[in-house]
Amino acid sequence: MATPTLTETLDLSAKFPGAVTADARPGYTGWIVEAGKLLEVAAFLRDEMGYDLLSSVTGVDYLPDEKMEVVYQAYKTTGGPGIFFKVQAPRLDPIEVPSVVPIWPGADLQEREIWDLYGVKFTGHPDLRRILTWEGFSGHPMRKDWKEAFYEEDAKPFKSRWPEGRIKMAEERNPFGDNVTFDEGFDPEKWTSNDPEEALYTSLKKYTAETSDGIKTDHILVNMGPQHPSTHGVFRAVVILDGETVVSLKPVMGYLHRNHEKIGERNTFLQNMPYTDRLDYFNSMSNNWGYALAVEKLMGVAVPERAEYIRVIMAELSRIQNHLIWTGMMLNDLGAYFTPALYAFEERELILDIFEAVAGSRMMCNYFRFGGLARDLPEGTLEKIKDLVFDRLAAKVDEFDRLLTENEILVARLKGISKLSPEDAVAYSMTGPVLRAAGVPYDIRRAEPYGIYDRFDFDVVTQTDGDMYARYLVRLEEMRQSLRILRQAIAGLPEGPIITGKPQYQVRVPAGEAYGRIEAPKGELGYYVISNGKPNPWRYHVRAPSFINLTALEKMCVGGKIADFVAILGTIDIVLGELDR
Amino acid sequence: MIWEWLIKALVLIFTLLIGFGYLTYYERRALAFIQSRLGPNRAGPQGLMQWMADAVKLIFKEELTPDNAYKLVFFLSPVVTMVPSIVIAAVIPWGPPVTLFGQTFNQYVADINVGILYLMSIASIAVYGIVLAGWSSNNKYAMMGGLRSSAQMISYELTLGLSFVVVILMAGSMSLVEIVEAQREVTWFAVIQPVGAILFFIATLAEVNRHPFDMPEAEQEIVAGYHTEYSGMKFALFFMAEYQKMIVISAIMTTLFFGGYLGPGVDRFPWLGPLYMAIKIIILLFFMIWVRASWPRIRYNRLMAFGWKVMLPLALALVFITATGILLADTMGNPWLMAIIPVLSLIAGWIATLMVDRSLRRKSYA
Amino acid sequence: MLFEYIAIATLIVLAVIVALIAIGLGELFGPKKKMEEKSMPYESGMTPYGPGTRRMPVRFYLIAVLFILFDIEVVFFLPWAIVFRQLGLFGLIEMAVFIAILLVGYIYAWKKGALEWE
């Protein structure tokens, strides 16, 4: 919990006297910036100090203090700890904060999310529309005074389910009609849509292009999704086409929005752990680790050695199975009718069997706890892991390499298409394999190691082209590097306890804020947790890599063909669970 | 006379229909085994009744017609798509003449002396059904899919026609029966002109919108192709048309390049003719299924570029190579000089692949 | 020889009857529950924007015209191929000249970009 900004003895309050003050709340770090000076400070941080990767933009509602706060976390691509700075605004509508999109374009979708969920208007934002709820929605769901439909109580455990300590049966409790409140004049039975899509369609760059002969051509507007076999879930993209070429594109998300963060505020800290499984439902082990990391920072507990090694083993196995699915699904999108997918799934099944043996469940593992793990490896699991890692998986990755990498049709469909330059990638807050394929060797396991990653010897896989083929190669090679880490981890696995202290149900977390981030297989997964001493978090935010990686989707697709759009979406590797939360 | 035609026509139609049913089963099973899974094995022993279950299911599905569709065309375009796929098999000979009840019957529905021209023309009619299906659905996606599909089909029809010319050169006649008989004297035409056979295979794959050329109807692309709005039996007719075309082009390919019904002992036991045809057709179908299981799709613009810029010149070159080879063999009087045809065509094919390779490695391919 | 075509005509008629029977079966046995959402044209679950039939890109017309030209060329190949052995060298050279003239047109179309992007 050391102040993360003292690497170059950065004293922002000396550079910007009066506008920047250090955040002095107990357990908090970073700087509080005045709204008027925000752009100047941001430009200074990016240009002079080198913080070019804006990792996350979060909104926090301090209802008792009558303040709305926007928290920024920025990092340097050269590595090292980041800088937190916040802007506070009085909690009176309209709440206005200048938008940092001119400086870090990657803040685009995140600021829209804060507008949608908190009602903070970002002046200067190019296209401030709601993103996770629909355009006609009224209210800002994450505000502390907004009660959702079927609202019971503010924090779990809900007394209404255990009145006087006795269980109330669900059949006796009828929530319908009790506490559903709608806006005035809104009747769900009689509501008809009178095109709430207008804002969306006008936001698309519509223009009638002139071909070289001066003939005006028509553009057609096409919806890809939400019901589409290849958009990896309920995801929609509105595309304007000129023949086959994409002229303009806007992603529309929120079809799977469950307001995970508000649920997180209702839960106790430990109750949130199974909910994090459901974010990126393919890699529950990684999701758990990020959350455990954040809360362990707040609690100040250290994790025993054996638990650290097992955490690494589970996370790297999770990474391998994620990349296996990715390869399979990517080729499915390209049209290779399920054959590579099923070959990949065969291996994944073996990894999932290990997860089942260890955690009890294949995909929703709920395995990590604050200060360690839930339970130790059972008998015989270590042998199975050794078999997989040392014998089978290495051979399988090589087989995939042989079958796929030089295939002409694959190369023709992936090479040279949708190039992303490294400057663009960093500006758009890309993280993960896409960033590394663009040529920026930024891997959190190397840049700001968590757990015991600083003890392992592995390469950060980078390619220089930035096109889709490079992303494929990066993921293929990352599987090999994960196997390398796994071999070292298995070799060094010590005996010992599996959790610090006794397993508790309700943990008391001291007040403060923490940002725990890990290198999830899809990118940088960060958890921003604020505690105020109570058993439930005050703010729980997930920095989802799939969501933020989509900021550059338009840039990557425009100018290409519509047939490539599906492939590009595949190479970004999104999962709707964490995209929409 | 009329009884003979009726019975032959009915036998052909039912063979094709049942063949279509078992082809779907064969494909799903073969695909599954390649993908290390099992495939349908529940409906009936080993899943052999799967196609009946599918057919019954499709009959009982609701026939939806979208609101602003052009009803008559919408209703008739499945028929227009399916009929050519059956009719094209009329000229294929399934075996040498057979004696039944004292009378000699020919094992084909009709043997017209312009058999190849008939094949080409019916193949062109098949394009109509697809365009009409896409257009009448009143759906942007479907129309674009239909147009792209038809553009693809007509582009590859040129290569198809030129492959036919290669065969006619070698056989000296357009009638399919005479082509098979010509192969009896010389050898299978695939041996003389292997690149022609491969070219024909690729061209017919593109003709029937089959993988890897099935982008216009692919699920993963622009939602679905020309048959998006079709449900129930009308969709089944499109499906039927595609698979029947697969069977029929396999049959045509064996007739033209692989000796048709020729095989050991077929003269004494004419009933062996259809058996040999069936074996060869099943092997060719397996190749089509194998291709489908292994490769991703080719993107549409590359597909068209391939058809116009690679296949067409290569087919033209093959025609001239074959012609030169035949001429040389005839004037010199030495039939072994025809061996120059496969050599030269292999060189031509190799040059074509080199050029494709070079264009793929060009960096600035958009 | 000509009445072989009647055989083909029988086949066509029978095939059409089979197809119509198939559709008829479907219409007979399938349920008919019309609903507004079902009758909308399909566009990935959203209401489509804009009319259903729009103008089509001009490239398709170009491809069709080029197809006609080269298809005629292929049709001219067919009778030549049948009597090729009788024609001998003269026939080959004659055809080569014909093809060379058409190739000029083909290369022109290629260079002008008529074969691009589609």
Image (spheres, grey):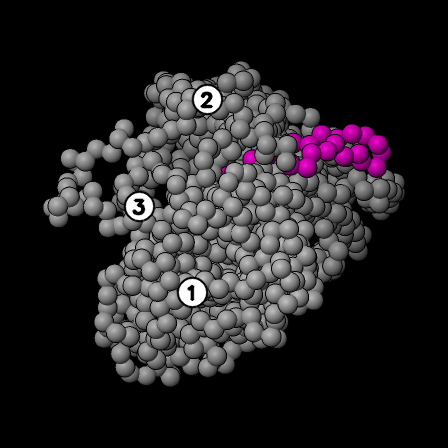
Residue A302 place in picture, x, y as percent: 35, 75
Q: CA distance from mark 3 to mark 2?
A: 33 Å
- Name which residue type carries label 3: Asp
Q: Residues within 10 Å of mark 2 (few under 14, many from 20)?
A: few
- Name which residue type carries label 1: Pro
Question: Would residue A182 be visible to someone looking at this image?
Answer: yes
**Mark closer to the chain start, 3 or 1:** 1
**Between residues B278 and C26, which one lies in front from this camera angle?**
C26
Q: Which mark is residue A154?
A: 3
Q: Residues within 10 Å of mark 1 (few under 14, many from 20)?
A: few
Could you tell me which chain the residue with mark 3 belongs to? A
Q: Which mark is residue A192?
A: 2
**Between residues B214 and A413, which one lies in front from this camera angle?**
A413
Q: Secondary structure at mark 3?
A: loop
Question: Would residue B177 be visible to someone looking at this image?
Answer: no
Q: Which residues are magenta?
A: A204-230
Residue A371 place in picture, x, y as percent: 32, 71
> Secondary structure of the magenta portion, mostly?
loop
Could you tell me which chain the residue with mark 2 belongs to? A
